[in-house]
Image (tube, coloured by chain):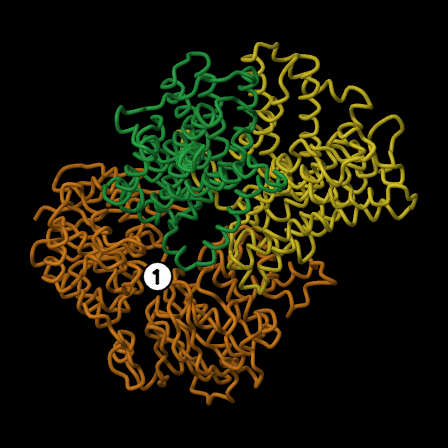
Amino acid sequence: MDGSDILVSAILTIITAATPLAFAALGELVVEKSGVLNLGVEGMMIVGAVMAFATGVTTDSAILAIVVGAISGAIVASIFGFLVLIMMSNQVATGLALTIFGLGLSALMGHGFVGMTFSGLPQLSIPFVSEIPIVGPIIFGQDGMVYLSVFCAFAIAWFLAKSRAGLILRAVGESHDAAHAIGYSVIRIRFLAILFGGAMAGLGGAYLSLAYTPLWVENMTAGRGWIALALVVFAAWKPWRAFFGAYLFGGITIIQLHIQGFGVAVPSQLLSMLPYLVTIIVLVFISRGSVRQRLSAPGSLGKSFYAAS
Amino acid sequence: MQPLLSLRKLRKEFPGCLANDAVDLDVLPGEIHALLGENGAGKSTLVKMIYGVLRPDDGEMVWNGQAVGIETPSAARSLGIGMVFQHFSLFEALTVLENISLGIPNELTGPGLSERIVEVSTSYGLPLDPQREVHSLSVGERQRIEIVRCLLQNPKLLIMDEPTSVLTPQEADKLFETLKRLSSEGVAILYISHRLEEIMDLCDKATILRLGRVVSDCDPSLESARSLAEMMMGSDLNLPEKRADNDPGPVRFKVRSLSTQPDDPFAVSLKNISFDLCDGEILGVAGLAGNGQVELMDLLSGEILCQQSDGIVMDNISVGAMRPGRRRDLGLGFVPEERLGHGAVPDMTLWENGFLSAMRSQDLMHKGFIKVAECVDFAEAVVTRFNVKTVGVDHNATSLSGGNLQKFIVGREIKQDPRVLIVLQPTWGVDAGSAAAIHQELLDLAAKGTAVLVISQDLDELFTVSDRIAVMCEGRLSEATPAAETTVEKIGLLMGGVGGADVIVERPAL
Amino acid sequence: MKIEARTEISKTMIYAAPVLAVVMTMIAGLGLFEIMGHNPFESLYTFFVAPVNTWDGVAELGVKGTPLILIAIGLSFGFRANVWNIGAEGQLTIGALAGSALALAFYDVESVFLLPGMIIVAALGGMAWAAIPAFLKTRYNANEILTSLMLTYIGLLVLSLLIHGPLKDPDGMNFPESRIFHDAAMLPILIEETRLHAGFLIMLAAVVSAWVILGRHIIGFQIRVIGMAPRAASYAGFDQKKMVWLVFLVAGALSGIAGICEIAGPLGQVVPVISPGYGFTAIIVAFVGRLHPVGIFFAGMLMALSYLGGENAQIELNMPNAVTGVFQGMLLFFLLACDVLIKYRLRFS
């Protein structure tokens, strides 16, 4: 294999590793922009993964599997939404509960699917352009979900910065009391954001079980949901930074796998620690700038909203 | 003339409290109508129902002759009702343009809004720059956003909830000009306040609420301040007795050149604050909220430590680097601005809240274990001595009304016999009876020889209790003048940053 | 249905909510079993009653409950102070490794000091691992949920690294297991013919100590105030950074002790999987137990029952073990929902 082939295959695997993180992080970013901290990303991702996989192997339809993955993520998110918005439960505890429940539920549902494989997502190989050396397969030879993730980054960035609905969402996240006083339905807006975040996490999980490793394994998210949460902080709640952050982490995951593949005499466990270590280091760096954080973090993030009527 | 707005027997109840009881109100077009009452009388609740934020439990609202149910604020806006909130409904991290855009119907947004904001705001004497972020604006400027937001929708009725509580006397005068102009243009104004002088100057009609009921409907120009006060509070109020001028004792507490550089972009930096506090005197510090009072309080109490330990000196001991516990050991007492969450833990009992401050001075621990019986005794002593209405000291702080909780917190500090007492906004949001009681306690405390510092936005309060008054503006403190030698106007100018040889202010050009 | 705030939090509901949640979980469990095609009441019996039908079963309850309660007590200190230590699983693992390293280093020494030494070293190991998120939070303001969690994944990888390398039994046919601990390194059994070990007593001591400290000691008071009203804590002069360190170190120590008790108790050696997620289940135990030591004791026993039930259901009814996780998650959900009744009242119009 010559150098450019190695490079291309490395980049292709980075894209596959980054895409689940990108979906999950972008979704959670929208949720947090509306003022809600949903720690249940891991739980929503894993449920999306198992449901998508189950649908995929049963119906052999990738599209259906993806849609089911998104919907199941949203359904699980709605439990969180109900508890946090209507029952005003503590957001941190409820998010944790969601993760524990999601992990357990997915293990239960996936029980019968261990050992099966899925045929994988079809590549959208656009004729001609995808033959261009190096650039071709990278930009034009991806599967549909990768393009979807890029589209989502564009759409979310535009939505938040330029649309009126995005402005209202940001306002709710800044100060839910002021938004309520003006007359916006804080609960409805947040619930929609939570559903969206759930669907995105579900998509991220679906990509894991359909494309990244087209198998089902218990706990296959291996902490990616948590990394996605860290990415949102790392991105200072800006969509494109979250997207590139996902690629950065995808890159780290792949690099350590490749190093292991090269037979370097470093124990595989040490290399596997890399993504988690990097997450910690990144968090420390980001959090030191508490001033900038104060301005970019949504003002009412994590606070419960109660209004008399 | 047919009333623009008529309220008939409006009723609103909350758990534990009847906020509005069979309220009748008529507002004529172009009329400036005052809604008077002391804290807790039900004024805010009433107007929130008119603006659609709350829904009445009973009664009827009639707009232009037709019965209406106002379900949401946008329904109120489409009828032509605008509201300027007491605690602004603004988003600090967003721009003026975005804030206004959020508060108006979708049809009015879009290209040209920025220009219209500049046009309307300048024409009414309340200029605004659409691109400024709200957190960088002063309180008076923020109020302009609220007002301009309403004006852009051509309101027929403008509701203003305690607008002058955050303005200097000069800014208030400017506001009155604007309101009189709107009134002459046919806009009705419902003006909530508890400030009698300005009601008498400004308003055509006044409806007075007490404990949720209408007690009077009158023409303020035909009344005196005293008669209005009596209608608002009921019985003859025991106004605090200022003692005869006693000479202040030795300087007990010295602050020298306190300066800070906060990391928080929303915080105010303090610039060279210096003052002396003598035994037996009350020093009042006037200033609108947001000019560094909270930052100063944090440094004085020890919640934030000073860079230089001798920035604060008490009894010749440098306390700047000492934490609150050690400062209390030296005889410092302090009452913060927020009752629930800062001065007291909401979901803890009164005796636990007593322990919070008095644990060292009243010896309420034994080898680290809390002496419950002694804590209960202390709390009960405070309750009795300071007339705190409560079911029992084993009930949570949230079960007390604002005024009673404030009496407890102030009483808790006074009961510990402090040498120096520092209070921030002592009677904010407190009913008049409790406020008068607290003022009397502060005066008595000073008479016994304690040095007292009162930081407040309420000029009436400061003139009631202070021997000397200084002004804080944008993190700077002016020289203190004896209260008898200054006037509300002069203090007001200093609050706005104008005049006063020792105050140098950079006002952002607007 | 309307939700309105109470003037004062309801003390009855503080105790009633967990009971209500348990009942609701049972009912949901019936539904779950039905969907899975099993007889609901029989399954519920197999899950919750059958495991403790024998004395041996009750002893097993103690075996499973010990680590859960130990960890949950530690976590409850943190949660009460609004410090979210999610890394108990990692602290447990590192503590267990530290204590085991001591035991294996002296594998041929019979000394009465070995076991206490192991426990102390395990506590220190857990504390060291917990010190990292504490440091990152107090010094750099890094979110402790994410740092402690990342450290859990790293901690488990450290276990894997060591068990495939230095800790492997040299006489053990290359399995990733350590030597079997000798008697001096094992916790004494309390009841003959059962697995109930002295760790149970350590757990009881922890419950009582926590009860005393949280209830009546100034440290407990500080923790509660910091969690409920941080500005009031500042007003009172409490050092919040010190408290963050304290609650992390306490949790780390207790998790480490729980870890070594597992190895020097039921496991008998270091293996690739020391804990079936006790560090995470303990979070549920802490909440269901209302963050109160006595409540945690009962909640821990209930969770232990759910583990035994899951194992039993696997054997008797051929149900996948994951059912346990679902029950535990549901219980926490129901508890959080019922908790709303503490601060608010439901009005049906």
According to the colouring, which chain is green?
A: A
| Amino acid under disc 1 | Met
Left or right: B493 as drawn, with respect to A17 = left
Tell me if B335 is positioned left or right of B77 in this view: right
From the top left corner, tell me how far across and down residue C49 is, in percent: 71, 19
Quarter containing the C terminus of chain B: bottom left
**Is C141 in front, or is C21?**
C141
| Position of residue B92 measured from the top left corner of the image (x, y, whole percent) | 31, 56
Count of numbered circles on the image: 1
Q: Left or right? Give the position of B296 relative to B315.
A: left
Q: Circle 1 — which element? A: helix
Quick check: can you spot residue C342? Answer: no
At x 56%, y 51%, the residue is C227
Give the x, y percent position of residue A227: 49, 41
Colour of chain C, in one word, is: yellow
Could you tell me which residue is drawn at 63 percent across and 13 percent down? C41
Q: How many C-alpha atoms fall within 10 Å of the one at disc 1: few (<14), some, or many (≥20)?
A: some
Q: What colour denotes chain B?
A: orange
Residue that extends furthest to the front in the rendered view of this protein: A2
Which of the two residues, B316 or A193, is positioned nearer the viewer here?
A193
The quarter of the picture where residue C175 lies is top right
Given residues C32 and B248, the one toward you in this image is C32
Vertical order, C176 against B62 (above or below): above
x and y percent of residue C24 in the render?
Answer: 56, 25
Residue at 53% over, 65% down: B386
Q: Mark 1 highlights which residue?
A: B233
